[in-house]
Structure formats: structure tokens, C-alpha cells
């Protein structure tokens, strides 16, 4: 399972400590995969860290905020969809 999203987290966690390949992922529109972790605070930090990368690419601050909201909404929607399937 890809762990690219884990590097966004501010603490050192491993797939083994999180249950390995049993955790689902969400995929950003840019293609980056973020592992869904069973901790709301860590999940939020991972999403916001990824969104920051998108915001840095935008040239206009207003455009950056619009992009951030779009990405945030998409990722949260995916998380809620996966949570409702369990």
C-alpha cells in the first residue's frame, strides 16, 4: 500500500503501527494518496499539510484559498464515503 501521505504527518508513524495494509486511502485530484488514519487530529493535519502544497503553487492568494477549499472538500468527502461503507 502506498504511504506517500504519511510523510505529511508531523510525527513518525509506520504502516505496522497503524495496522499495515488494512487502512484505506484517499486520493487527491493531483494523484497523491493519503492514508486514512483512525485519529481525526492526525488525519486533519495530513490533509492540511497536503493542501498547503497546493496553495504554494497558486500565484494569486484568492485562487489559493479556492483551490484549498476544493481539495479539502474532495478529501473529506472521500473520507466520509469510506467511513459510511464500514
Image (cartoon, grey):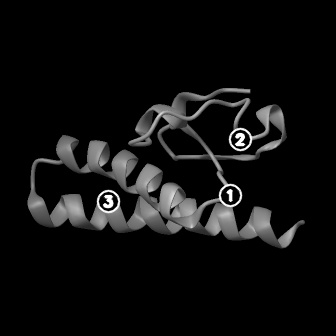
What residue did someone put label 3 on?
A: 67
Query: Residue at point 41% right, 65% down?
Result: 70
Query: Residue at point 55% right, 59% down?
Result: 75
Sequence-wise, which precedes: disc 2 or disc 3?
A: 2
Q: Is residue 1 left or right of residue 31?
A: right
Out of 46 and 51, give the one closest to the viewer.
Answer: 46
Query: Residue at point 69% right, 70% down?
Result: 80
- Secondary structure category for the residue under label 2: loop
What residue did someone put label 1 on?
A: 38
Q: Position of residue 51 (x, y in %)?
A: 35, 52
Q: Position of residue 82 (x, y in %)?
A: 78, 62
Out of 13 and 54, give the one closest to the viewer.
Answer: 13
Q: CA distance from mark 2 to mark 3?
A: 30 Å
Residues under numbered marks 1 and 2 in contact, where contact means CB atoms less than 8 Å apart: yes
Sequence-wise, which precedes: disc 1 or disc 2?
A: 2
Query: Residue at point 36% right, 68% down?
Result: 69
What residue did someone put label 2 on?
A: 18
- Most distant residue in the left direction: 60
Q: Is residue 71 left or right of residue 33?
A: left
Amino acid at each position: 500500500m502506498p504511504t506517500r501521505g504519511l510523510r505529511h504527518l508531523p510525527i513518525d508513524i509506520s504502516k505496522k503501527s497503524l495496522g499495515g495494509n488494512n487502512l484505506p486511502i484517499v486520493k487527491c485530484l493531483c494523484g497523491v494518496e493519503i492514508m486514512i488514519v483512525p485519529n481525526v487530529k492526525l488525519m486533519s493535519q495530513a490533509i492540511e499539510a497536503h493542501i498547503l502544497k497546493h496553495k504554494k503553487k497558486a500565484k494569486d492568494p484568492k485562487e489559493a484559498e479556492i483551490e484549498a477549499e476544493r481539495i479539502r472538500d474532495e478529501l473529506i468527502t472521500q473520507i466520509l464515503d469510506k467511513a459510511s461503507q464500514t
